[in-house]
Image: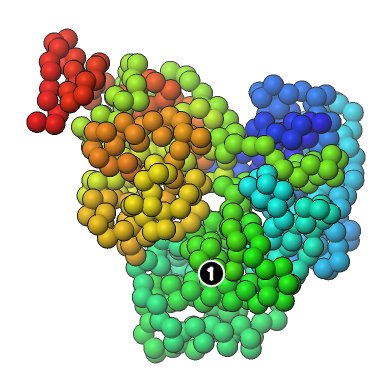
Amino acid sequence: MVICGLKLTHDGSVAIVDNGKLVFCIEMEKLNNNPRYSSIENTSVIENTLLKQGYRLEDIDFFAIDGWGGYSQDALAIQPRLSIGDSNNILSIINKEENISLRIAQYQERNLKDDILKPQNYDDLIIDDKPTIVYDSFLHVTGHVMSAYCSSPFAQNRESSYILVWDGGMYPRLYFFDVESKKIENLGPICLLIGNIYTIFSQHFGPFKTKGNFAKDDLSIAGKVMAYIALGNLRRELLPIFDEIYKETYNHPMGFANIFANEFKKRIVGLNYSDEDILLSFHVFLEELLVDKLHKKIARSGKINQNICIAGGCALNIKWNSAIRDSGVFKDVYVPPFPNDSGSAIGVACAAMLNKTGRYHLDWSVYSGPDVIKNEPAENWQKMPFSIKELAYLLHETNEPVVLLNGKAELGPRALGNRSIIGAASSLRMKDILNTIKQRESYRPVSPICLVECAEEIFEPGTQDPFMLFDHQVREHWIDKLPAIMHLDGTARLQTVSEKHNKPLAQLLRAYQEITSIPVLCNTSANFNGKGFFPDIHSVTEWGGVNYVWSEDTLYFKKEVRPQQRIIQETSKEYVFELEGIEEEIELFA
């Protein structure tokens, strides 16, 4: 059975699950250098995306569409395309220059007894002049639950699991998937704070401060705040104040974040706390509240020593993920690389897969985005064949960053080596170079990529983390060796790499380790500021933020920086170079 999952609002995407295998998930932001969080507003995008990936509309057995919007006009921030109904909401989309109205499911269940796997069946989808398309629409939370569980090792191993979902428009909610019954038990909210309180509260302080006393949710803020708080010191005396405000003033989920922030500002007048201290302390308040309430709910459920999957936009917070991992409450913790809405199309396709076929395990790879487009570079660039070993030497010899555009793009918001800018982690200046290239604030960290078998020696805990979604500490005897990848608080957002997950990247790290004895490189995403990953060679070379771009054994380089030394043969302790047409033997390890 071929199922097409659709996410039509922000983080729009089209996913195909064919007989239990994820064939692709194309996120709109990863096409044509589109803006981050791009949506699907025209049905032609759906058809064109399918055709480019080798599927016709006639090949699809079933469509599944992600739900969106609350139960009232003030229950969730309303988009211009969305209107609220009683049993469903209405989303408009353009077909051949005319608006059509799609009935879709809503954001979350109304009560604990609702079956979140129960679809709403409609026939409103029209694409071009084709017959009306029948589709199922699932609650938005269902997409998060199913994308997390179905992609997890627990599903593959036929193990039950908790699923914690904390998204921007909902409380943190706990579910339990039972493999025997293939049903989901709803265990209810952990606390009564919706996920966007983190970003809205933060916009009352520091560099994120907005004018006035009312801030709106901003999808781009949370990651910056998580980096900024490393500048602060934890003020534990503020935590009881946060708790008092929560208990005394909570009255409504939407809008409470601004009420909370303004009340807090009143209570600390004249106390002279720095903004970075306030934001770090608020972060810790939410973290400890989450772990404590989660622990208590698990104890009441009676299902102890179980696995847990974490999903929703808040699952991009590596420090909260790590706190749950380190709590000792769970047997194992899994976070998918697409915990935010970038995984919603996959999630609703998985929900349809379970309903239609009974299957709950998804066969998938994180590298299932669009292929890199191998067009010609910009005018002032040249290209030449270039092996992975040559690339390793280039990184070491030039100490310059290189863009990697290789194979299919990663799913989700993290660059994991196929749409990355990489550089020497041992360089004192590399973090500043990369932040300047990316036009980012100086306090923003860059991430380490490390061979999986070396990770425990260098990082604490250094456990497998292929999707860069947990916090790790740099071990003391490696701190001076890896200045570029350590954040201000001594942590690092590690990606462990193996041949199983990314063979070219693992080969590069091994070749680099042979030269430098260091199995680690820097990694940050390759994109225009505010855009998705670079989709092709021409746009990244036209951008020109670096001197070198490597893609599938080809090096693209600016004419004025043509590599003068090129490895053509390797011996045990020597490299042989071609230097402007003259062969020389150069002893590297004299």
In the rendered structure, the answer to whether residue 507 lies left or right of residue 327 reads left
- Asked if one can make out residue 159 in the rendered structure from this viewpoint, the answer is yes
In the foreground, 425 or 202: 425
The colour scheme applied to this rendered structure is: rainbow
Q: Amino acid at mark 1?
A: Ser
In the image, what residue occupies the spot 58% across and 34% down?
Answer: 369
The residue located at (38%, 59%) in the rendering is: 460
453 vs 309, left or right, is: left
Task: Say whether residue 33 is visible.
Answer: no
Res 393 → quadrant:
top left
User: Which quadrant holds residue 51?
Assistant: top right
Residue sitting at 27 percent across and 33 percent down? 514
Location of mark 1 (residue)? 327
x, y percent for residue 358: 83, 43
For image coordinates 33% across by 20% down, the residue present is 386
Q: Is residue 203 above or below residue 131?
A: below
Query: What crowding class fits label 1: few (fewer than 14 Cα within 10 Å), some (14-19), or many (20 or more)?
Result: few
The one nearer the camera, 422 or 333, is 333
Residue 54, image x, y percentages: 69, 21
